[in-house]
Image (cartoon, rainbow, N blue to C red):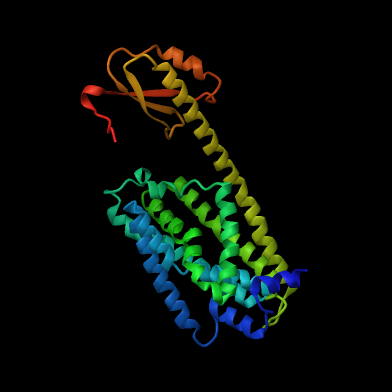
């Protein structure tokens, strides 16, 4: 059954020539190894620089540009391919190059941010903050994207989908984000970005190794295979992925709770302000986990006790802070 599925996925039976093509594509070996490594790090440094400035500038387009040219997926897919083939030497080379790439991307983000640290506050930049709270949904997306990446690389007739895969799987931007946040001494947020990267990293390894095995690459090898190395590689990646899912689930749960609380407070506030000259501008969770309610209007506010009574027991003991903006000094955009 697996042979027929593998043939269906790949299109043709996998032979030694196809294995060699894949090795040349995703592994850093052979007489051109040094050139491939140099090209990899040059592109990675450029992509990391673009990602860093795109993140600091809060520009989605620039960050996407960095994703497209970033070559970091190559050694990660190469590691997945090596695990599938049971090739210990290639595993070692791909692992070392990917680790070197990780360190390089973080370093670029760090050193490019240092001179600018007094001009930017990463906590106020959406593109930075959105990469600090990964959830289980990010893991699920990474697993599917890992399959897509391995599939696209294993079939030259669909390789034109690789830019889309590069955009879908976030690798270099989270690492540049780590550098930015380390430079600005936001260590806990930096850990969140690193968690996002590690989620994507191990998802690609697991899904890639499985898909290459199903396609038949593991059964046709031009190098000596080690079954124990294959098992150890897949087991280690799977265990780490399971461990990563714990903080992802915790983060996702907290995001769900925060969203529920803001909706509850927002709905109760609209009822509380009904009949007064005030209206709600926004409701958000602050860094100290309080609920900040921004309202606009003039005149006397309704009794705060009424709002607190309405949300009592529904907001997990959070405190409500109210920020009042007077209509005489502020105008809402009617558009």
Measured from the top left, where is residue 152 in percent x and y? 56, 70
Measured from the top left, where is residue 138 in percent x and y? 55, 51
In front: 223, or 296?
Answer: 296
Q: In screen coordinates, is 306 left or right of 232?
A: left
Measured from the top left, where is residue 304 in percent x and y? 41, 14
Image quadrant in which you'd find residue 68 = bottom left
Q: In screen coordinates, is 213 left or right of 128?
A: right
In front: 3, or 132?
Answer: 3
Above or below, 252 relative to 212: above
Whether residue 69 is visible here, answered yes or no, is yes
Measured from the top left, where is residue 328 in percent x and y? 21, 22
Above or below, 251 relative to 314: below
Q: In screen coordinates, is 123 left or right of 10?
A: left
Quadrant holding the N terminus? bottom right
Q: Residue at x 49, y 14 (%)?
A: 309
Above or below, 63 relative to 259: below
Above or below, 11 relative to 275: below
Whether residue 108 is visible here, answered yes or no, is no
In front: 61, or 53?
Answer: 61
């Amino acid at each position: 059954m697996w042979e027929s599925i593998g043939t269906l996925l790949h299109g043709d039976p996998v032979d030694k020539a196809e294995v060699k093509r894949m090795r040349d594509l995703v592994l850093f070996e052979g007489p051109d190894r040094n050139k491939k490594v140099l090209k990899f790090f040059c592109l990675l440094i450029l992509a990391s620089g673009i990602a860093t400035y795109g993140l600091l500038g809060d520009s989605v387009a620039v960050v996407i540009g960095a994703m497209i040219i970033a070559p970091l997926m190559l050694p990660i897919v190469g590691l997945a391919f090596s695990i599938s083939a049971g090739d210990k030497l290639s595993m070692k080379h791909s692992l070392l190059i990917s680790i070197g790439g990780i360190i390089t991307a973080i370093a670029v983000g760090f050193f490019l941010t240092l001179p600018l640290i007094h001009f930017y506050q990463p906590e106020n930049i959406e593109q930075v903050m959105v990469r600090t709270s990964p959830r289980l949904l990010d893991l699920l997306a990474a697993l599917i994207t890992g399959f897509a990446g391995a599939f696209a690389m294993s079939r030259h007739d669909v390789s034109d989908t690789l830019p889309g895969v590069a955009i879908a799987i976030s690798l270099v931007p989270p690492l540049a984000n780590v550098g930015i946040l380390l430079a600005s001494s936001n260590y806990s947020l930096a850990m969140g970005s690193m968690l996002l990267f590690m989620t994507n990293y191990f998802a690609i390894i697991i899904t890639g190794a499985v898909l290459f095995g199903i396609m038949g690459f593991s059964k046709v090898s031009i190098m000596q295979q080690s079954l124990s190395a294959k098992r150890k590689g897949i087991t280690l990646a799977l265990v780490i992925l399971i461990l990563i899912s714990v903080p992802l689930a915790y983060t996702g749960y907290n995001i769900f709770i925060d969203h529920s609380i803001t909706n509850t407070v927002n709905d109760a506030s609209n009822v509380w302000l009904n009949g007064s000259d005030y209206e709600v501008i926004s409701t958000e969770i602050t860094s100290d986990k309080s609920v900040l309610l921004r309202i606009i209007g003039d005149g006397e506010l309704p009794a705060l006790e009424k709002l607190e009574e309405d949300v009592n027991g529904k907001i997990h003991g959070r405190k409500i802070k109210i920020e009042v903006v007077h209509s005489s000094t502020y105008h809402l955009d009617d558009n």
